[in-house]
Image (cartoon, grey):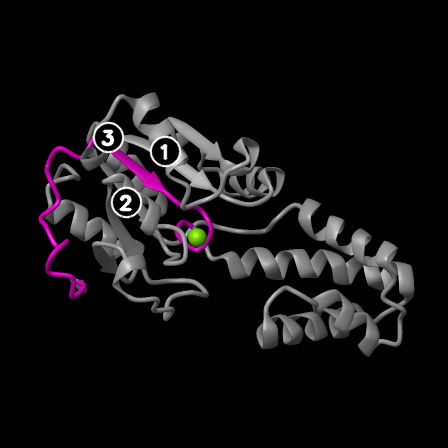
Amino acid sequence: MIYLSMKKTLKKLPESIKLVLFDLDDTLYDEADFVKSGLGAVAEYLAVSHGLDQSAAYKAMIKHFKKQGRGKIFNQTLSEFKINPTAVLIKKLVSLYRRHRPEIKVYQGVRPLLERLKSSGLKLALVTDTNWRVQARKLNALGIAKYFDRIIFTDKLNLKKPDLKIYRQIFKKFMVRPLEVLCVGDDPTCDFIGARTAGCQTIRIRQGRLMDLRLGPAREADYAVKSIKELSDFLRREKILCE
Ligand SMILES: [Mg+2]
């Protein structure tokens, strides 16, 4: 457990937490698995449509992903295999990537944690940004939608974290005060600054691709843990989870 050095904001979690608000990507499952599974679907397509060696195409895409993230993977891979990266082909590959049936699993301990939170009488919500259809497919594949009282696809609302409107809508919907809401996420660019400004409690799980990202106190969470297990231990210690 790491208590961040933010003495002014460091406070004991109130036992009156009523709602836990989860982020999805890299908080409840490893987003890199989604990327790998999507690139696998694209490699399979390129093998059939352009006669590429499927495994070589996949390895090339993974290499470009590791080097510089998702931005130009398809352009670079096609160029590497001497295929003209036309706008039409890129669009097709992006669509395949987004629409594929993802092979992803929740992090170890997620299901028991969500079950324990529910049986402890807490309400659960999930807030996720970006293309809502893609996010819905991920949730389907993970099989965890049933645990949440509400799933908020910010994309459908033309919003994205850290917009305060998201949190205000949640307070209203669940009839809770900001301090009764605990937000759990992994991304210091957007998961905590809005939630904290809105008055919620925040916990960062340092896992996934942003685990080492440090953006300074203003964007950090009130608390940080390294895994779902540490999160569960923390919530038990703070008496948010019943024994
Ligand atoms: Mg995330």
Question: Is residue 15 magenta-colored?
Answer: yes
The rendered magenta stretch, by its main secondary structure, is classed as loop
Give the labeled residue for mark 2. 197
Q: Which residues are magenta?
A: 4-28
Q: Secondary structure at mark 3?
A: loop
- Please identify, in this view, whether the residue under mark 2 or under mark 1 is nearer the observer: 2
Which of the image's four quarters has the N terminus?
A: bottom left
Q: Residue at x 78, y 55 (%)?
A: 93
Q: Residue at x 67, y 48 (%)?
A: 98
- Where residue 238 sits: x, y (%)? 11, 45
Give the quarter of the image for residue 71.
bottom right
Q: Total number of numbered labels?
A: 3
How far apart in space, not on screen, are marks 3 and 1 (Cα)? 10 Å
Give the quarter of the image for residue 70.
bottom right
Nearer the observer, 116 or 188: 188
Give the labeled residue for mark 1. 125
Task: Tell me the kind of residue under disc 2.
Answer: Thr
Up the image or down, 73 lies above or below 92; here it is below
Give the labeled residue for mark 3. 122
